[in-house]
């Protein structure tokens, strides 16, 4: 029964296993289901084990039970604008009046219609923004990505619920917040017994006591602590500006993570040359040679940057974008030095993987294992940092 | 769902549930599989177990997980130190090991003569391996105590509710055995119900103003910690106690400190939003927020 639904789910990258599928069959055979609505929730609670996959599930559900295509995504920028209710204040009287005239369902319908039109007639995303008369922002303000407004949950059909795709924001490949980064960074640990002997070693105590003819002899040992030390090198300014927020999230998460034995960070611009900097304004310089001298090779190194520059900036002497830096070694040599010095390095790139065929990105990717700066990428990077060579 | 046998859990008078949640609970009871509940802090994950226990009239056992909790402790603890001590100073018969075996919360639920609801609270606090260590016991609902040669087998499978804050990823093998539910942040109509459970006599105007303000604050993504249900309830309590006029709630957001618990959030809120509100006096604040 429904076996192809199983494959639809797997195609949509929902990690469903046979065990879970059999559980669902068991539930179905007991006859608890009276409608598609029940089935939607039943199957979801049994098959999907993380809210990160709810959105994938919704899409698969739509596909299987209705055969319609998933709606086009609304660009992030617009979504962000919409999320801030205070933006409404800056609409003119007229615009707001227009917004208030439509009720929710009309707005939804209109929005969906336009989104569909858009994919049929245009590839770009700009079309519906420009459509005159009615402010598009208002439309999407009520978009299903938000919460349900009005209307009780019970009366809706399962497909409508799936269509709403309220879990879009929980997808792993989209969201990143400090907490999530912290969770990912928590993977970076290697426990070692260090510090004062403050933990009772029961086995040894019993042994010793027995040897002592029953006279209690307490044996203590050191407790386990994380020995991971981390070095964060971040590209700032220029082409990294659009990712500044993302990078600051990563930075605060790493900084707040108390479980590292040591945490060091430096900034650079575009590529690492003769100097790295203690501050974003790049005034407090430390020579790269000195850095490599003082940092032990067992630091785990995370480099963050778009790795996107003119090839000469990477390959040439004096190639640094600021002529006064007058680097005596090409950037790529510096990067190699870093990769050789430290045993565990990764490069996190905020650019989407679609752009990774740029020449400089390709070159740097050959030196450092490169991952996308997303939760998924970060998790992979952490795994890479923790493995023994 | 119409099946009486299935539809055991209907929520309780002081805990408002959604359809999806009731469904998940009933699936887990019917299929005898643990229910894993996740959700933002303050969405009532822990309270759910209390509500289930109350709803179907069973006793509740709570096992709070801490970072140092080991799976073994849930089953039983063999108090060797006590036995060692007794062997030296005590006058008890130390050859009877059974008196040094103390059942943990999980063991208690297994050994009980009646059906229980077992809450394993914040399972992700423990070590990464913790859930895996419990797999077999939760599957078989029995465990063996090598020290005494006893096997504890359940008479009635307890209804197991597990909560998690997603601080750590749970192992796949563990997840496969669970029924999963994600408690979403309540939408305004549901929130209204929840508030009315806490404040049955609240004035409609106050409620609607407070909710509108609350949800518009939650839409601001820059906050480190978004205000949650418990903060909203506190805030409304303050609003009622202070007799704040309803009209100024959305414009001045009095007692914002009750909603925003982090200094940085509060500062951000005052700088970025309150100032903007004041400079655009021509627009009525409430209209703007709606």
Image (cartoon, coloured by chain):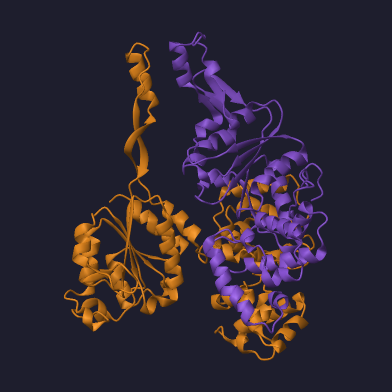
Q: Is residue A199 above or below residue A364?
A: above
Q: Is residue B73 above or below residue B183?
A: above
Name the one closer to the observer, A126 or A213: A213
Q: Image check: B44 left or right of A242?
A: right
Looking at the colours in the rendered structure, which chain would you say is drawn in purple?
B
Q: Residue furthest bottom?
A: A132
What number of labels is visible?
0
Q: Is residue B162 above or below residue B166?
A: above
**Residue at 55 percent of width and 84 percent of height:** A123
Name the one closer to the observer, B259 or A183: B259
Q: Image check: B186 left or right of A320?
A: right
The spot of residue A159 in percent (x, y) is: 71, 65
The spot of residue B8 in percent (x, y) is: 77, 43
The spot of residue A95 in percent (x, y) is: 70, 87
Is residue B223 at all visible to an observer of this figure? no
- For chain A, the rendered hue is orange
Q: Residue furthest front?
A: B242
Residue B190 lies in what quarter of the image? Answer: bottom right
Residue B235 lies in what quarter of the image? Answer: bottom right
Q: Residue furthest left?
A: A328
Name the one closer to the observer, B215 or A116: B215
Residue B6 lies in what quarter of the image? Answer: top right
């Amino acid at each position: 029964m429904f076996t192809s639904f199983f494959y639809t789910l797997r195609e949509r990258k929902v990690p469903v296993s046979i065990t879970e599928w059999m559980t669902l069959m068991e539930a179905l055979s007991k006859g608890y289901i009276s409608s598609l609505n029940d089935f939607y929730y039943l199957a979801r609670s049994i098959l999907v084990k993380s809210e990160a996959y709810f959105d994938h599930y919704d899409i698969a559900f739509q596909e299987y039970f209705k055969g319609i295509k998933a709606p086009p995504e609304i660009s992030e920028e617009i979504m962000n604008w919409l999320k801030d209710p205070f933006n409404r204040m800056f609409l003119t009287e007229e615009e707001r009046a227009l917004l208030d005239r439509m009720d929710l369902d009309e707005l939804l319908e209109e929005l969906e219609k336009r989104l569909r039109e858009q994919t049929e007639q245009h590839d770009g995303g700009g079309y519906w923004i420009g459509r005159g008369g009615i402010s598009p922002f208002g439309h999407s303000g009520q978009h299903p990505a938000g919460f349900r407004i009005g209307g009780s949950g019970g009366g809706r059909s399962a497909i409508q619920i799936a269509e709403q795709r309220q879990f879009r924001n929980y997808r792993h490949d989209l969201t990143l917040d400090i907490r999530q980064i912290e969770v990912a960074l928590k993977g970076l640990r290697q426990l070692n017994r260090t510090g004062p002997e403050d933990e009772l070693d029961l086995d040894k105590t019993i042994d010793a006591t027995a040897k002592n003819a029953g006279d209690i002899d307490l044996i203590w040992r050191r407790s386990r602590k994380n020995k991971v030390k981390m070095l964060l090198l971040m590209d700032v300014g220029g082409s990294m500006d659009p990712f500044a927020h993302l990078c600051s999230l990563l930075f605060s998460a790493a900084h707040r993570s108390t479980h590292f034995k040591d945490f060091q960070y430096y900034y650079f611009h575009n590529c690492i040359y003769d100097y790295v900097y203690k501050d974003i304004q790049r005034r407090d310089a430390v020579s790269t040679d000195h850095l490599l001298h003082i940092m032990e090779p067992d630091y785990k190194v995370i480099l963050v940057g778009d790795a996107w520059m003119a090839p000469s900036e990477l390959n040439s002497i004096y190639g640094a974008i600021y002529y006064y830096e007058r680097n005596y070694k090409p950037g790529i040599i510096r990067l190699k030095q870093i990769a050789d010095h430290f045993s565990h390095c990764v490069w996190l790139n905020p650019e989407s993987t679609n752009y990774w065929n740029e020449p400089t990105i390709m070159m740097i990717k050959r030196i450092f294992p490169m991952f996308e700066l997303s939760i998924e990428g970060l998790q992979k990077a952490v795994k890479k940092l923790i493995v023994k060579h | 769902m119409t099946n009486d046998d299935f539809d055991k859990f209907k929520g309780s008078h002081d805990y408002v549930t959604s359809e999806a949640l009731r469904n998940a609970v009933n699936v887990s009871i019917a299929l005898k599989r643990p229910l894993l509940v996740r959700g933002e802090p303050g969405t009532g994950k822990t309270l759910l177990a209390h509500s289930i226990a109350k709803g179907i009239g069973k006793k509740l056992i709570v096992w709070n997980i801490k970072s140092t909790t080991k799976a073994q402790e849930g089953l039983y603890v063999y108090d060797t130190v006590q036995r060692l001590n007794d062997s030296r100073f005590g006058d008890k018969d130390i050859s009877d090991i059974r008196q040094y075996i103390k059942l943990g919360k999980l063991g208690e639920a297994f050994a009980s003569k009646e059906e229980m609801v077992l809450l394993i609270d914040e399972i992700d606090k423990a070590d990464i391996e913790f859930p895996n260590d419990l797999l077999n016991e939760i599957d078989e609902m029995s465990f063996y105590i090598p020290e005494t040669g006893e096997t504890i087998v359940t008479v009635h499978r307890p209804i197991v509710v597990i909560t998690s804050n997603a601080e750590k990823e749970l192992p796949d093998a563990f997840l496969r055995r669970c029924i999963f539910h994600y408690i979403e942040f309540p939408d305004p109509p549901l929130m209204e119900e929840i508030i009315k459970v806490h404040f049955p006599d609240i004035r409609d105007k106050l409620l609607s103003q407070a909710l509108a303000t609350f949800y518009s604050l939650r839409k601001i993504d820059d906050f480190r910690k978004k205000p949650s249900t418990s903060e909203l309830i506190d805030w409304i309590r303050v609003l009622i106690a202070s007799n704040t006029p309803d009209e100024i709630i959305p414009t001045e957001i009095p007692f914002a400190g009750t909603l925003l618990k982090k200094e940085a959030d509060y500062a951000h809120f005052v700088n970025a939003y309150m100032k903007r509100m004041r400079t655009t006096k021509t627009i009525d604040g409430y209209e703007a927020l709606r």
